[in-house]
Amino acid sequence: MKRIELIQVECYSGYRANETPRAFIRKGKRYQILEIRDRWYEGGISRKSIRLDYYKVLAEDGGEYILRYNGLFDKWALLLK
């Protein structure tokens, strides 16, 4: 089972809300996102499965992070190792 931590994310919103993450806040610290290295989704194929959008990002601190967006609940999470 994946461990997650709920976070706040600042996003670019173009033709849809929360289109791409630009920065995230974890434990009171803001991390600017320099690059989105990969992006994918799980679920959403049937009405019974929730679509989850994932973003592998490079932050200004040099760390790589995986962010997950749950559109059903409009919540962002950081996946922890």
Image (tube, helix red, strand yellow):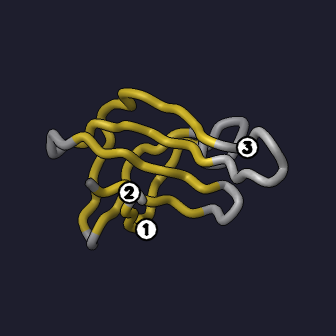
The label on residue 44 is: 3
- In the image, 3 versus 72, the foreground residue is 3
The amino acid sitting under disc 2 is Leu
The label on residue 78 is: 2
Element under label 3?
Answer: loop
Structural distance between the alpha carbons of marks 1 and 2: 6 Å
Q: How many marks?
A: 3
Q: Residue at x 81, y 44 (%)?
A: 46
Q: Residue at x 70, y 53 (%)?
A: 50
Mark 2 / mark 3, whichever is N-terminal = 3
Element under label 1?
Answer: strand
Considering only vertical position in the picture, is 1 above or below 53?
below
Are there few (<14), some (14-19), or many (20+) residues within 10 Å of tag 2?
many
The label on residue 6 is: 1
Q: Residue at x 30, y 47 (%)?
A: 32
- Residue 6 point in image, percent of width and height: 43, 68
Structural distance between the alpha carbons of marks 1 and 3: 21 Å
Q: Are marks 1 and 2 in contact (CB under 8 Å)?
A: yes
Q: Quadrant of the C terminus?
A: bottom left
Are there few (<14), some (14-19), or many (20+) residues within 10 Å of tag 1?
some
Are there few (<14), some (14-19), or many (20+) residues within 10 Å of tag 3?
few
Relative to 47, 5 lies left or right: left
Considering only vertical position in the picture, is 81 above or below 12?
below
Element under label 2?
Answer: strand
